[in-house]
Amino acid sequence: MSNLPSTDENFGAVNIRLTDEPLEPMVQATSCEEPWLSHPDAGAILWFHGVTRRQTKKGDHVTITKELSYTAHREMAVKQLNELANNAVHEFGLHRVVIWHRLGTVPIGQASVIVGCSSAHRVAALDAVAAIMDRLKQDVPIWKQEHFESGECHWIHPSPTTDDPRTH
Amino acid sequence: MTPPCSIDVLLFAGASESAGGADRVTVQTHPRPTANELMTQLAEQHTELAAMVQRSRLAVDQRYVSPDHVIETDAEVALIPPVSGG
């Protein structure tokens, strides 16, 4: 298990973080002490948690996941996430964006990624979170390794022609 | 005769696994190869990575590059397999 320090980058309206620690406490802490998404002109504040899922169904086939582990090209991932977030600020007219991704082992039920957006109206924040997640899954150099209850494990490397990024 | 040179390529995830857990491999090449040339040489010199190279992108100095991008000797080069964050 890596004990590397968190990579935490602040770029004005954008906060990017890669960390080996659980993400959920950071949401609670920032809500109280440093509300990243607050803005006097925000009419919508949206937090999305991508969570490790136990069961995956593909047709009639069911697999049971024990845990996921994540690795990254950390420096490049931070740059990519920063670019992605800043593009989203301009494209969707957002006030604030948070993208936090956990690395290392993520047990079932815990968040591997948290995206937060604030905007004047709800549609912009809802659309932005969906777009950010789609783009993260296409371009940001982070990889998950799935560990199954059966003892098997393998890296997930989706095929652009056969795997829908919205389902992995 | 062009003098040979070598470029280290960083490996991650399934690419690292294919290379026996190595975090990088060295590719013998010529000065200032294109990304496409380096990918071809990588697959030829490290055949255990050939299948992954077919599915991967190349990043130079932490940016994805086009096949005709010229790679300088001191650049950071990384093989980026299909990503799966989130």
Image (spheres, rainbow, N blue to C red):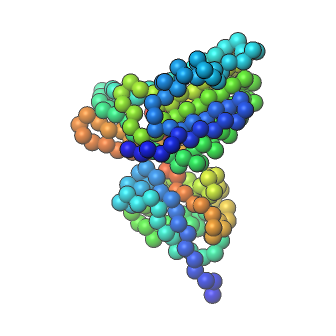
Residue B64 in the image: state x and y as whole percent.
62, 52
Quadrant housing residue A141: top right
Task: From the viewer's perspective, tell me whether residue A11 is left or right of residue A109.
Answer: right
Q: Residue at x 57, y 44 (%)?
A: A77
Q: Residue at x 43, y 50 (%)?
A: B13
Q: Residue furthest front?
A: A33
Residue A45 in the image: state x and y as whole percent.
64, 16
Q: Is residue B11 visible?
A: yes
Q: Name the quadrant of the C terminus of chain A.
A: top left
Task: From the viewer's perspective, tell me whether residue A158 is left or right of residue B73.
Answer: left
Q: Residue furthest top?
A: A43
Please state which of residues A17 and B27 is positioned toward the viewer in this rendering: A17
Residue A105 in the image: state x and y as whole percent.
38, 37
Quadrant housing residue A145: top left
Q: Residue furthest left?
A: A150
Please state which of residues A160 and B7 is positioned toward the viewer in this rendering: B7
Q: Name the quadrant of the N terminus of chain A.
A: top left
